[in-house]
Amino acid sequence: MVSATLHPDPQAPAPRDDQARRPQGARAPRPGRTLTHRRKVEHFWSGLFLSPTLLIIGVFTVVPLLITVVISFTDWSVFRPLGDWEYVGLRNYESLLANTTRMQAIWNTIAYVVLSVVFTVPLAALVAMLLYFPKLRGAGVVRVALFATYVIPTIAVVIVWGNLYAPGYGPFSAAFTAVGLPAPGWLSDPKLALISVVVFNVWQMLGYYVILLTAGLTQIPEELYEAAKIDGAGILRQTWSVTIPLLKPTLLFVVLMTIVNSIQVFDPIYLLTRGGPANATNVLSYEIQRAAFEYNKAGDAAALSVSLLMIVVLVGAVVVIVTRRKK
């Protein structure tokens, strides 16, 4: 017995490190229990570090959103204390379809969104490819100049474009007068006012979308273009068969951002046209402001806001579903 203890069998398997370190009589830890404990610890610390951000989002986003939903079912006015209201049910939502001005605002918003997407996304994709592929000197400077139009305060840009559109002395009107043509009423003609605001939006947002699409182009491997060149594909064929298919996720994101930003447009409408002429540029966001602060109908404004939120969520859901199907 003594010799067996002092001289172990050489053919016996050597103990593992964890077995050698474990005291005699102690049980081996269960792998599942250890993994679950680690996950609980990670979840605890993650929730602890995220709690300030979640608290801020809850206080300044979720709570006002819930209050807006409640107000949409009341007849509250901004000139009465919060809570001094009467519940009217779905009357505010039913009045949306019966009010011709608000229906026109909905159609103007749809037209504004469609025109912004049609003009902005293809132009941004074209500019991004022209700045990325030729490897021209100064392309970075051009990108910075384009992005500067996005970061400049809207009020400063509106002052410039207000003078560009000004009848008589504005450069656009002067160009028509110089060639003997009558100057259009850029912001005074109901047929041109909305298009003029769309042009302003395209100019202001183009640089931001160009940066996003350029970032998407950097994710496409160069080997694919080299293989396409070996197969005899020209520039147009490479663009159609390589660039556009691999750039689709970024393009869909840009389309979504364009739609959301266009639906929420307010500053250019408020500063350039005030919804005119003849409500030709009146959109949902501006109608919400008028209903709340000019007509003193906060309940109607809240119903419009909830409707606008539902539209944005619906559009986002459609884009996400399309993206997943493409993948």
Image (spheres, grey):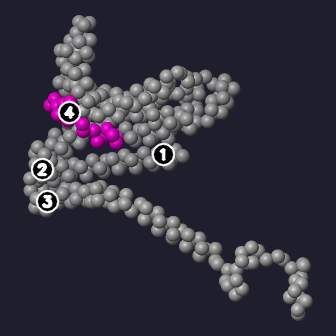
The residue sitting at 31% across, 47% down in the picture is: 311
Q: CA distance from mark 4 to mark 2?
A: 22 Å
In the picture as drawn, the residue positioned furthest to the left comes out as 79
Q: Position of residue 235 (x, y in %)?
A: 58, 23
| Residue 126 at least partly seen | no
Q: Amino acid at mark 4?
A: Leu
Contact between labelled residues 4 and 1, with CB atoms less than 8 Å apart: no
Residue 323 badge? 1
Q: Is residue 97 magenta?
A: no
Q: With 71 as the anchor, is 38 left or right in this view?
A: right
Q: Work out whether mark 4 precedes mark 2 in sequence or the reverse, and give the earlier one.
A: 4
Contact between labelled residues 3 and 1, with CB atoms less than 8 Å apart: no
Q: Position of residue 15 (x, y in %)?
A: 79, 77
Element carrying mark 1: helix
Q: CA distance from mark 4 to mark 3?
A: 30 Å
Which of the pair 97/196 is nearer the observer?
196
Q: CA distance from mark 2 to mark 3?
A: 13 Å
Q: Is residue 273 magenta?
A: yes
Question: Can you identify the residue that label 3 sits on?
Answer: 82
Question: Can you identify the residue that label 4 sits on?
Answer: 271
Q: Work out whether mark 1 precedes mark 3 in sequence or the reverse, and give the earlier one.
A: 3
Crowding at label 1, few (<14), some or many (≥20) Cα neighbours within 10 Å?
some
